[in-house]
Amino acid sequence: MTDEYLSQLNPPQREAVETIEGPLLIVAGPGSGKTRVITNRIAYLIQTCGVSPYKIAALTFTNKAAKEMQERLRQSLGQSALRISASTFHSFCSMILRQSGDKIGLANDFVIFDDDDQIAVVKRAMIECDIDPKRFSPRSILSAISSSKSQLLDVDGYRTKKSNYYEEIVSRVYEKYEEVLAQSSAVDFDDLLMKTYSLFEFDKSILQKYQDKYLYLMVDEFQDTNIAQYNIAKQLSESHKNLCVVGDPDQSIYSWRNADIRNILSFQTDYPKAKVISLEENYRSTKTILKGAKSLISANTSRVDKDLWTNNTEGTPIAVMEGYNEEEEAQLVIREIGRISESGGYSLGDISVMYRVNAQSRAFEMACQRYGVPYQVVGGVKFYQRKEIKDITAYLRLILNTHDDISLNRIINVPTRGIGQRTIDELTRVAHDMEIPLFEAIDKVTSLSNQEMDISVQLGSRAIRALSDFKNLITLMSNELDGSKLVSLIESVLAKSGLKKHVQSDDQAEDRIENIQEYISSAAQFSELQGRQALTSFLESISLVADIDSLEDGADFLTLITLHQAKGLEFPVVFVAGMEEGILPHMRSIESGDPSELEEERRLFYVGMTRAREKLYLMRSFRRGFRGGSGPSAPSRFLSEIPDELIMIPSREQTSPKPQEKSPKKNAGNQLRHMHATPKKPQKESFSNSKKPKPRIRRVVNKISPPNSDPVYKTGDKVKHHSFGDGIVLNTESTANDVQVTVAFKEGTGVKKLLASFAKLEKTDQ
DNA sequence: AATTAGGCATTTTTT
DNA sequence: ATGCCTAATT
């Protein structure tokens, strides 16, 4: 049976699978069966070479990729696949630091600060250094710090390397920044990597422990790793050298996040004996699409040419379509979707719209809503970045760790409780003078007199009272931490803090409440753990998930996604929107004047093109909205880098009668009817003249109920979901035109809230 | 002293 | 169109 899966591989794939000892670089072109090679290689290690699954670690870029790998392995290997460590670098490092971080003075219940928190820390550090946040942008200082950390350059290292005035400023902020993090017992994303690296350097016995644990190491998307990640991989494999990295330099699209393409070169110089295997047969795309992509990418000068080829059919030409503005661009896409799903048998789940910037999703979302096309937006305004979610999270962090000044600052007056800026400033000053966290300062200020503190405090009695109430509130909540379940803790925090009322009175209450419910149901997954443990794990999980992780495949939605997030995915039909100068390539890369930035844009487009299996559409619009106004938009230079003979430009008459057509709904309605996509309520124009604008939400799925075919679910029913598997109904809740069912699934999926009309749950009696 | 309302600049991509 | 800062308001 070993032979069976080996015989399904082409010769280089097979060689990659069978090369298990020593350093190995797999250069995997798009669609070349990379995932297949990785999973087969692991299966080979376990089944043929008798390696224990415990000894294998696979590091991927996203949680989704990790999960997918585990799922595939489970299919070929059974339950033992769960013993393989498959995770992202960040969560892998987080695990190590929680286990052994105390050796370098890190509390094991550290919190992970996200982007917003980091900005807050930078601002605070700047103020403490007497640097005006208006003179230097906190964002750019943060990116300097982050870039430094990604290269394993700590404060001292940076200080000695700094060479100009700006870097002097950064170096001062960097130092304070680290102090604030340490005081808050928090780490940022880059720390997860850098601290793991220094832990290994600092204590070789710990490193050895992990080297012995992970005898076989694999790194996916190697072209997108940064220096820190590469060095950790090197450390871990130092003793056995069983390091297999998989990547494609042409798909390197994260240099702005300090990914360093030089890692691929370094790998070959660091391991001169490394075997290099290229996977060049593409199993995904038509000849036309592949030819177009190859021709495009060959315009990059700094690259090594590959010889990609495919046995697939010629396929249809690449369609280039132009709309008058972004609305029409979206309309064209929707109509084309209607056309091909009717004549080509494609369903919505086969189709994706990809764009450069999240803002572009708007026009498509509106078009989908108008024509009743169910869709999912990946990313956008990120779920865990929404205000209500960040607020409740800040409360939770604070009760777990009262040293967390950043979280305290966020919620000390949310909802408003009479603690204004002046009070906060004074409190900050006291905390700073006494060198204590803000929360402790509140305690001092409210319980001691000025003489007792030998520091004078300028606060009125009203402020003192408000602070005292706040302190009691947080203390009260902290006391619940150990006794109660995570879900009830969160509910209690919502109630006691007044956040619940606050949110309910918001003008977007409905959606915010829905978001909080989703938040609570994701917390329910941690119900086996106790008190602090549960909260720590929950907080960690929400810091490390990306939105891409929530992408449902299998479901029949149109997928709207950024080109960056689309990496690693594939769809039979792909629309790349916004093929214009300034969008793709992005303005910034043009203005920077750095040719390598333009090359990265080209790679990004290359990634987009190569996601398509059968049909590729390149969309552009003649005018594009820009900061309120709108202006003409020139076609992307990338369009001219695709040979004309591969391109077809459909005549406008076929697709769109008139740009200003007032009632396109009817036409499209007819075209789309068979998609089970009846428009949501008679909502039609409401998005344009309602005073309550529809909020942007992460995954907007049109709630369309198929007529009276809903089975009735009740608590305790056993059900089956096509992708989540078996589960038990915990609760049902009727909404306006649907029923929301809360189901606890087995096998790690946890508790989900689903809409009855969409989930297609099957009842499994007994 | 806190809140709120209106004015100003602002948006790349994300673990 | 959204968020942050300043100025008017209670």
Image (cartoon, coloured by chain):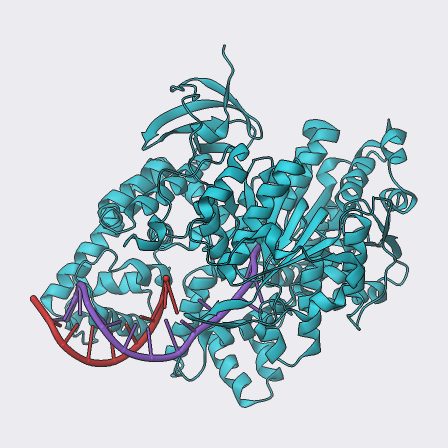
Chain colours: A cyan, B purple, C red
Where is residue A329? Give x, y as percent: 55, 57
> Which image quarter: residue B15?
bottom right
> Where residue A326 sits in the image (x, y, percent)?
51, 61
Looking at the figure, which quarter contains the N terminus of chain A? top right
- Measured from the top left, where is residue A353 in percent x and y? 59, 51
Where A411 falls versus A704 (above or below)? below
Is A597 located above or below residue A393 in the figure?
below
Q: How far from the left and from the top, in percent, is residue A25?
A: 83, 55
Examine the rendering and report whether any part of residue A97 can be seen. no
Q: Nearer the viewer, residue A49 or A525?
A: A525
User: Residue at position x 79%, y 67% from top?
Assistant: A266
As drawn, A451 above or below A702: below
Instruction: Please say if A64 is above or below A271.
Output: above
Viewer-nearest residue: A453 or A475: A475
Q: Is residue A726 left or right of residue A484?
A: right
Q: Residue furthest top?
A: A766
Residue in front for this viewpoint, A172 or A656? A656
Classify residue A306 as left or right of residue A629. Answer: right
Residue A246 makes an appearance in the image: yes
C2 sits to left or right of A37: left
Please give the count of numbered marks on the rendered protein: 0
- At 22% from the left edge and 49% from the top edge, which residue is drawn? A505
